[in-house]
Structure formats: C-alpha cells, structure tokens
Image: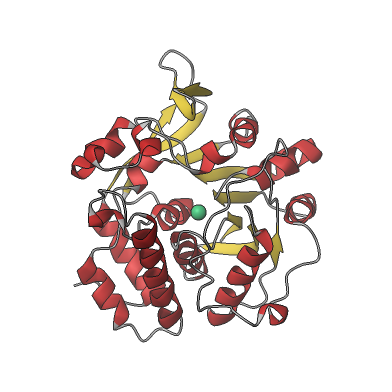
Amino acid sequence: MIPIILDTDIGTDVDDALALTLAVGSPEIDILAVTTVGVDSCLRGRIARKLLRVLGRDEIPVAAGCDRRLDGGEFKPMPMSSARGFIENEQDGLPLQEQHAVDLIIDLLQGANAKITLVLIGPVTNAAMALKRRPQIKEKIERFVVMGGSIHPKDILREEGWLKWVPGFLRAGVETNLNTDPAAAEVILNSGIPILLVPAEVTFRTYLAEQERAQFRQSTAPQSAALNHMCDEFEAMLAESTARMPVDRRFAQVYLHDPLTVATVFTQDFVTVEAFHLRPGKRFGVFRTLPQDRLPANALVVTDLDGTAFKRLFAERVFGVTLR
Ligand SMILES: [Ca+2]
C-alpha cells in the first residue's frame, strides 16, 4: 500500500469529494490523513469528516490547514457547494484534529518509517508551509502528486471548441490550483522532491456525461446519495454563476480533475507520462509551469489519457457501478 496524505480544498468543486471517495475505495492507497486548504478550511475539513463517516472511515484524521496564501495574502472566497444540504446544523458533531494541518503533516512525516506521498488536489500552501518550517521533512516525502500546472494550455482550448465561451482566465491558459498560490507552487516545484503533475489540459478531458450521471443515480452504494446530491449542488452552483454568461451548458459539468490525480498515485495504466524540465514563471500575468527543452527533466507530467478506461475504474470504485 502507498501511504499518502490527501491535501484538498474539498467543498467548492465536487471533484475533491469524488477524489476522496476514490482514495478510500482504492486498496492500493493507505490514507494517513486528510488536510484541507483554502478559505473556510475548517468547514472544508468538516465536509471531509462527514464524508469519511459516510464511507465508514471515521478513524482517518482530518485537520484544517492554511486559509491564507503562503505570502499571507487572502485566498479568493469560493462558494461551498458540497456543504449545501450535507452538513448544515451538525458542525459540532464533526470534530477535526486540534492540530493545524501543517503541524500534522510535519508530525506524520517526521514519525514515518516509510516515505509518504503527498497528494495535493488544491492550492499547495500546506505542503509549502510545512517544507519552509521543517526543511528536513524533505527526505521523508516519496513524491508530490499534484493536480495543477499547465504545460500546453492551448490544449484546453482546443477541446470541444471552447475558446468562444470559456472565461478569460482560462483563455490565458491558467489552471486554478498553482495559480491561486504561486509562491507556494514555486516552493514545491523548486524543492527537488520528485513530482508528478496532472495538468489541467488533461483533466479537462474527463467529465461525467449525463448517461453516466443517470447510472450513478441508480447506485445502491452507501455513499451514492451524498455524492449524487453534491454533484447536483455543484452543477446548480455553476449554472447560477454562469447564468448571465454566453456559456455553453456543457461547462456546467462535473470534471474529474482530482479523481484522475488520485488514480495516478497507484496506476499509470490509462495515462501517458512524460518527463519535462519545468520552470515556474509568469506569462500574461498568470502562473505557469513552463517546459524548458534543453534542460534535464525535473518533473513527470501526465500528457495523455484513456478517458474510457479511467472512468470505468472511477465508476466501480466511487459508485460501485459498472458503466454500460
Ligand atoms: Ca480540488
């Protein structure tokens, strides 16, 4: 089993909840802790706490982490679609670790006999803060598996002819996680610790079609009601926030950015991975992971995906459904 710490901004986009469920449902992975990041990191922690209860894994520790960027700046507030109708009025019954996520990450690493993989599916602030505070934990980190970065951002736009309707920030080729806290992203990318990036141009290619959502609604798995509800709330939130935009309705969909990232922790059966030298930098004011052709590789990057094979595994492990 691969020991991991799952660091997540669960709560806004539903894919973190799906990714946590996939991690729990994957026997290849041993989840040592779940840590949260972003505005409302405590509320995010309670969503994770309750979902783990639904999944029958109450013993996994959950700690709330950084609710500001590494440089002290504020994160942009984000709506919490996964909380709606899921944890209202019961927050006291959803206890988190007393320790801050950064301290828990440091303690787990320092006390570990085997190296631990840090799976980062939100802004990478907690891991960067832990490294700054205790640089010696470096030798206990097996690798970072990160949902983020953008090597060929134009590929995002080529998919489905989105260019005419995607918001401007995507047109500039940005992904959210690294760009939300660029200083933290630089710490991770420059740490010398092995890194596997799962960039946005690949994750945007895997999303749930309506016939797949329909099959998941028939699922009798104990977690399916909660997950289907969260997917509905997320789509409703997207529909609300884009109501006045000339946006293709396909945008209001559940993308599997974070579940794909969790899957790559234990299998590369349905992805292509290539080595790059990546340099953190800015282009047109947005943070980018820029490939440098002439320098030796310092990162592995997922560059292609067999979406059908991935979704088959996802459906079986998250909803207990064999896709038709
Ligand atoms: Ca996320």
Figure quadrant of residue 223: bottom left
Measuring 79% from the left and 50% from the top, which residue is drawn there? 110
The one of 41 and 322 positioned closer to us in this rendering: 41
Measuring 75% from the left and 51% from the top, which residue is drawn there? 102
Figure quadrant of residue 260: bottom left
**Residue 117 horizontal/vertical position (percent):** 60, 50
**Quarter of the picture holding the N terminus:** bottom right
Residue 285 in the image: above or below residue 93:
above
Residue 64 in the image: above or below residue 245:
below
Measuring 42% from the left and 30% from the top, which residue is drawn there? 275
- Does residue 278 appear in the picture of this structure? no
Q: Left or right: where does residue 103 sit relative to residue 51? A: right
**Quarter of the picture holding the C terminus:** bottom left
Residue at the far front in the pictured view: 244
- Does residue 137 appear in the picture of this structure? yes
**Residue 90 horizontal/vertical position (percent):** 65, 82
Measuring 49% from the left and 40% from the top, which residue is drawn there? 196
